[in-house]
Image: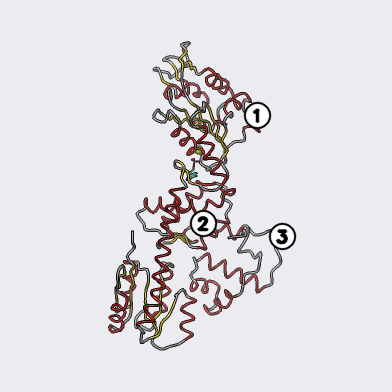
Amino acid sequence: MRHLIKILAIDDDAGVLSVVKAALTGDGIEVLVANDPTVGWEMVRQLNPDIVLLDLVMPALGGMELLDKIVDWNPSIDVVLLTGEYRIEYAVEAIQRGACDYLTKPVEIELLRERVGKLIAGTQNRLRSIEIEEAFVRASQFGEMVGRSPEMLDAFVRLQRIAPHYRSALITGETGTGKELAARALHALSPVSTRPLVVCNCAAIVETLFESELFGHVKGAFTGAVQDRTGMFESANGGTIFLDEIGEVPLVSQSKLLRVLQNQEVQRVGSSAVRTLNVRVIAATNRDLRAMIAKNQFREDLYYRLSMVRVQLPRLVDRKQDLPLLERHFLEEFSRRFAKRIKGITHRAQGLLARYPWPGNVRELENAIGHACMMTAGDNIDVRDLPEDLQNYRHTQGPGAAAPLLTLAEAGRCHAQYVLDRVGGNKQEAAEILGISRNTLYRILKEPLPSNGQTEPGAEPGH
Ligand SMILES: Nc1ncnc2c1ncn2[C@@H]1O[C@H](COP(=O)(O)OP(=O)(O)OP(=O)(O)O)[C@@H](O)[C@H]1O
Ligand SMILES: [Mg+2]
């Protein structure tokens, strides 16, 4: 699908506007004009143009001021300054504030077409690469699971291979690594995919009711058993039961569970009748069952019974190459859910996501992107949109004792960066907080960050 490129020209000189409009309007390119900066700003917010041509000297709202607003509102809009009086220091300042080009007036048609043509090509490339990324996400999906890293491909291959044959399987991995998704994929690929998948969250069952929940009971079996009840195993007959958080099953119930698995028979609590079953069992846990066995908290024979087929899901830190793919996946999902047109993630935010250790794995990433999609007012997610824990991460996880001691100037450089990042890149605000002029801030930011400086903790090669 071809994207209509929207260009907005803002200038108080109607002559300039008509020249620009005539010169740039074309196939797939729409040129809108505003001859008043206030109207222009409204139009920016309503139309979200790809490119803005902005007169630098306008009454009411100065060009620089409007530039700041536009860049702050949506950093991905390309802003080109038009300036009457050719003043190189204006141009330099404008570029530093986020404009991407400037042209002098009177506008030369050929030059205008050439420069804006480049920006249009850049926008189209960006859009194409987003389409490619989206196609790549679709191609990297296994059931609901997204991944392309060798670790995930291994897991996919394993799930695919065992799906036709397994009777019981154990899925392990830290919290949020996708164990439930893997269990669902396994069931969906199995020969019983049209039969029920019964999910049993073992951690949520009261210990005394465990057997009744899993195996059922007959009326009068215990106080409160006012009628017969079918257990989850029977409900799953012909299909699959997913025993989530298997490590939470009370020890006394583990032996009964083992017997059911071995014999494929259940007895309802309070009944001697034996019912034969045909149930596949998928168990999952984020606990270290071997360590639990060593402490007599988990039965070794049950462990072996379950773990004949085992799938271990990698931690997100161990498959960071999947981050861009997962980010794109969740971005699409939440853009849809919140009915927002969010195109991407700024480089700064991506850098932070790449450095963060993700103790909550994919779930935590999903929540972070969801939060950012909800918070963002623009069409690219920036550091300031991410949850605070994450924003603060880069500042709290310093290199610790190994950090080199900085000079005052180097520490100042780091601190300026820290403040700038905290205010989402708004240099005006950062300068105010730091108590210095914006020019001084620019000068400081031109200095390179000291290597191993505090604002770049844990930065990995390649990011
Ligand atoms: N590979 C993946 N691709 C896309 N989404 C994923 C992936 N892995 C996990 N998720 C998402 O992350 C969230 C957590 O996944 P899931 O519930 O399967 O994790 P879990 O391993 O069962 O975690 P816990 O041990 O805490 O129960 C879900 O919303 C899931 O959709
Ligand atoms: Mg789970």
Q: If the image is split into quadrants, where does the N terminus sit?
A: bottom left
Q: What amino acid is found at the position of numbered circle 2 in the picture? A: Glu
Give the residue number, with chain letter if any, for mark 1: 293
What is the C-alpha distance between the residues marked 1 and 3? 39 Å
Q: Is mark 3 within 8 Å of ligand 1?
A: no
Residue marked by disc 2: 388
- Return the disc, 1 or 3, that comes first in the chain's sequence: 1
Residue 7, compared with residue 325, is above or below; it is below
What is the residue that sits farthest to the bottom in this orientation? 85
Question: SS at mark 2?
Answer: helix
Instruction: Decide: few, some or many residues near mark 1? Use Cα within 10 Å; few <14, some 14-19, many ≥20.
Output: some
Q: Position of residue 346 (x, y in %)?
A: 48, 62
- Given residues 249 and 280, the one toward you in this image is 280
Q: Is residue 293 above or below residue 348?
A: above
Examine the rendered structure and indicate whether residue 273 appears above or below residue 207. Answer: above
- What secondary structure is marked by label 1? helix
Residue at x-position 51% and y-position 41%: 178
Helix, strand or loop at mark 3: helix
Residue 402's tag is: 3
- On whether ligand 1 comes within 8 Å of the CB at mark 1, the answer is no
Give percent across and percent down for residue 192: 43, 28
**Which of the image's four quarters has the C terminus?**
bottom right
Q: Amino acid at mark 3?
A: Ala
When the figure is inspected, residue 357 is found, relative to residue 48, above or below; the finding is: above
Instruction: Judge from the rendering whether residue 96 lies leftward or rightward of residue 22; answer left or right.
Output: right
**N-terminal-most mark, 2 or 3:** 2
Marks 2/3: CA–CA distance? 26 Å
